[in-house]
């Protein structure tokens, strides 16, 4: 019983400074997956987009429903192609994050 109580006290004392550490908080923030969208478009549209001749815009739905439709338009605003967006989660590289955390702890 006494050993268990002293372990709990020791863990509490060890956790408090770590939880307040900016490096630890940054580490926790960095391991959250980030959500990005991939744009699916035709090969011709991709070439024109990369050249800067097309821009990604959003149109409202014509049937009255809420939402936006991603489209590619020319610089003059003329419709070129409707595209789809696929959501993707990107998880960070844990090894680099952990090494950054340990380096920050050593500098502190």
Image: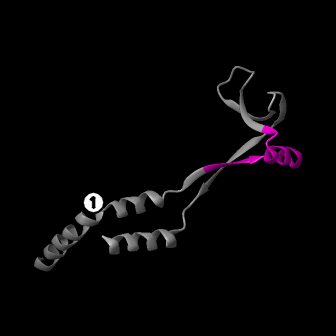
Picture residue at 14% right of the left edge, 79% below the top: 3
Picture residue at 47% right of the left edge, 68% below the top: 97
Residue 84: x %, y % from top left: 75, 42
Quadrant in the rendering for residue 80:
top right
Task: Say above or below: 72 vs 30.
Answer: above
Residue with the most extreme left position: 2
Image quarter where the C terminus lies is: bottom left
Count numbered badges in the picture: 1
Picture residue at 80% right of the left edge, 32% below the top: 75
Q: Nearer the viewer, residue 91 or 80?
A: 80
Residue 75 horizontal side relative to residue 19, left or right: right
Residue bounds of the magenta highlight: 36-54
Which residue corresponds to mark 1?
A: 20
Residue 21: x %, y % from top left: 30, 62
Task: Say above or below: 14 vs 43.
Answer: below
Quadrant in the rendering for residue 27:
bottom left
Residue 52: x %, y % from top left: 79, 42
Residue 11: x %, y % from top left: 22, 71
Residue 54 horizontal side relative to residue 25, left or right: right
Q: Nearer the viewer, residue 10 or 57?
A: 57
Q: Is residue 38 magenta?
A: yes
Q: Is residue 53 magenta?
A: yes
The image's colour scheme reads: one colour
Neighbourhood count class around disc 1 (C-alpha, 10 Å): few under 14, some 14–19, many 20 upward: few
Residue 94 horizontal side relative to residue 67, left or right: left
Image quarter where the N terminus lies is: bottom left
Quadrant in the rendering for residue 23:
bottom left
Q: Secondary structure at mark 1?
A: helix
């Amino acid at each position: 019983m006494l050993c268990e109580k002293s372990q709990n006290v020791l863990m509490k004392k060890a956790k408090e400074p770590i939880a307040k550490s900016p490096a630890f908080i940054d580490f926790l923030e960095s391991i959250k997956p980030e959500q990005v969208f991939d744009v699916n478009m035709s090969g011709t549209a991709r070439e024109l987009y990369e050249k800067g001749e097309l821009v990604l815009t959003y149109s409202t739905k014509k049937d009255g429903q809420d939402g936006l439709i991603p489209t590619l338009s020319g610089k003059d605003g003329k419709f070129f192609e409707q595209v789809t967006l696929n959501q993707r989660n990107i998880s960070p590289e844990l090894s680099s994050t952990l090494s950054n955390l340990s380096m920050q702890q050593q500098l502190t």
